Amino acid sequence: MKPFWMGKYEVTWDEYEPFQLTSIGPAKDGSRQVWKPTDKPEDLISQPTPPYQPMDFGMGRDRYPAICMTQHAANKYCQWLSAQTGQFYRLPTEAEWEYAARAGTKTAYFFGDDKAQLKDYAWYFDNAPNFQYAKIGLKKPNPWGLYDIYGNVCEWCLDQYTPTTPATSILGNDWVRSKTPYPHVARGGTYDDDPELLRSSARKASDPLWKQQDPQLPKSIWYLTDATWLGFRIVRPLEIPTVEEMFAAWNNGVAKE
């Protein structure tokens, strides 16, 4: 496993909304943009279409996790943030996410196997305020200082979902490359889940039903109307990848879900 930094918190609306408002759209002449290795990233980031309603669904925005974005939208946020900061950011691989969540432990949870302790570290079905997500950072962090790594909202990973945890040949900083639009991996469990689904090894597979109520035709590539418990956190690898590797991370998938 090559070293990387991971976001202390889930990405919040305060961080995500500037991307929705300021990211770059089509080329000035109206033509379709085609990425080339020589292009500047800030000139190539497509802009989320305006949602048909506020995507927090009234649950709160100030220091609350951003939710309801597709994996494509989360990837493009990482590309936009990289362009703004001059640093490379992306979604974590599934292996990176679990490595960080476990924080050197081998038990069901980073604090051990006693589910009764979960209330000190996570928002889930038994204690979520008003049966919705909570502000970030209100529970205790894991041993490596990551808050809400369990519960609150589950978090996108780069990987295509496979029936079992990926083989050791692709573990680490690489990921299972996408061959189909669905499913992709989300980790960590949600405010609406039971303790078993918050274990470090628990996995969730994306599904077209996550945008079932989207009234648009075709359905949006940016929003998941039925995934009000899904967000993400970001990583920054210590080793700067090649431009081609950056492009692969920001454009993972054979279709935009």
Image: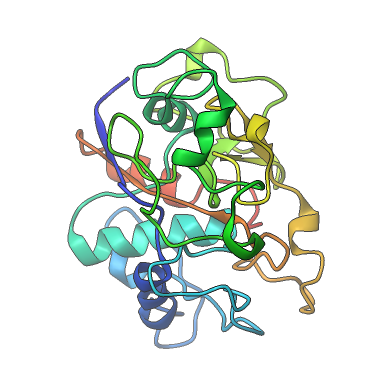
Q: Quadrant of the N terminus?
A: top left
202 up-or-down from 130: above or below: above
Quarter assignment of residue 6: top left
Q: Would residue 126 be found to the left or right of residue 135 on screen?
A: right
What percent of the width, then of the height, locates residue 90? 37, 47
**Which sits in the foreground, 218 or 71?**
71
The figure's colour scheme reads rainbow
Quarter assignment of residue 210: bottom right
49 up-or-down from 15: above or below: below
**Which sits in the foreground, 52 or 191?**
191
Residue drawn at (56%, 13%), measured in percent from left and top? 167
What percent of the width, then of the height, locates residue 28? 39, 87
139 up-or-down from 61: above or below: above
Quarter assignment of residue 226: bottom right
Q: Would residue 182 be found to the left or right of residue 48 on screen?
A: right
Residue drawn at (40%, 16%), measured in percent from left and top? 105
- In this view, the residue farthest toward the bottom is 29
Residue 161 seen anywhere in this rendered image of the structure: no
Q: Would residue 241 be found to the left or right of residue 62 on screen?
A: left
Residue drawn at (56%, 80%), measured in percent from left and top? 49
What percent of the width, then of the height, locates residue 137? 36, 53
Query: How many labels sit on residues?
Result: 0
Q: Quadrant of the C terminus?
A: bottom right
**Which sits in the foreground, 136 or 100?**
136
What percent of the width, then of the height, locates residue 36? 36, 57
Residue 252 seen anywhere in this rendered image of the structure: yes
